[in-house]
Amino acid sequence: MARSATVSRKTGETDITITIDLDGSGKVDVETGVGFFDHMLCAFGRHGLFDLTVRAAGDTQVDDHHTVEDVGIVLGQAVREALGDKAGITRFADVALAMDESLVQAAIDVSGRGQAYVDLPVPTQKVGTFDTELAEEFFIAFARDAALTLHVRELAGSNSHHIIEAAFKAFGRALRFACELDPRVIGVPSTKGSL
């Protein structure tokens, strides 16, 4: 059973196509026009073991906000589609990931309810040309459109690059574990019978 999806979205601000295979090997090919964000998406895919292709063109002459947020929207929609009816998935995952001085926790419930709680107090407003506040915008957009609950919380850190990268790696691993199939799970993992 293939758990993959391709989703496209075109607006007056962005033109995005994303393909994801939840049962991949970490093969990633990303082009968004936002260098640091490309690096973060590559870390997400590689450490989540997702095969991920992202093609995004956006109005980066204005700023990177629309591109980053809209990639979150489209990636969320692609993950939601790839999960299908969610039968047999693990559903919950919690990962604390260390990267140098930084420690970030990501927890996921594939709940069917899109919400995000992000606490990443990074010490600088920029990493290179990337506005650090856009990391939170990405996670919020992703969780809403993937219809899952996502918590991302910085436990330690002093370097903005390390904090954000640890967040994306922890997010990738948590999503991987929450989406993995568990042969002991019969049907949808919910006492309600649906997610």
Image (cartoon, rainbow, N blue to C red):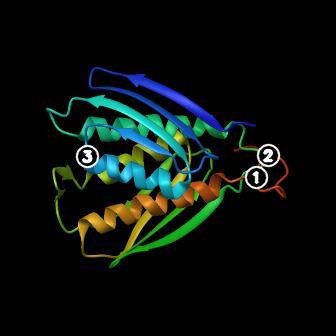
Q: Is residue 74 above or below residue 130?
A: above
In the image, what residue type sits under mark 3? Gly
Q: Which numbered disc covers residue 12?
A: none
Image quadrant where residue 51 sits: top right
Q: Nearer the viewer, mark 3 or mark 2?
A: 3
Q: Residue at x 31, y 48 (%)?
A: 37
Write down the residue under mark 2: 193
In the image, what residue type sits under mark 2? Gly
Picture quarter with the N terminus: top right
User: Residue 72, how many percent across, how many down?
Assistant: 41, 41
Say which of 4 and 153 sits in front: 4
Q: Is residue 165 above or below residue 187?
A: below
Write down the residue under mark 1: 190
Contact (Cβ within 8 Å) of mark 1 with mark 2: yes
Q: Label 1 crowding class (10 Å Cα cut-off): few <14, some 14-19, many 20+?
A: few
Q: CA distance from mark 3 to mark 2?
A: 42 Å
Q: Is residue 193 left or right of residue 118?
A: right
Q: CA distance from mark 1 to mark 2?
A: 5 Å
Picture quarter with the C terminus: top right
Q: Residue at x 24, y 66 (%)?
A: 160
Q: Nearer the viewer, mark 3 or mark 1?
A: 3
User: Residue 17, how many percent across, how many down?
Assistant: 43, 28
Q: Is residue 185 left or right of residue 154?
A: right
In the image, what residue type sits under mark 1? Ser
Q: Is residue 47 above or below residue 57?
A: below
Write down the residue under mark 3: 35
Under circle 1, the secondary element is loop
Q: Is residue 112 left or right of residue 2?
A: left
Q: Residue at x 77, y 44 (%)?
A: 87
User: Residue 76, how many percent across, how many down?
Assistant: 50, 40
Q: CA distance from mark 3 to mark 1?
A: 40 Å
Q: Residue at x 30, y 76 (%)?
A: 157
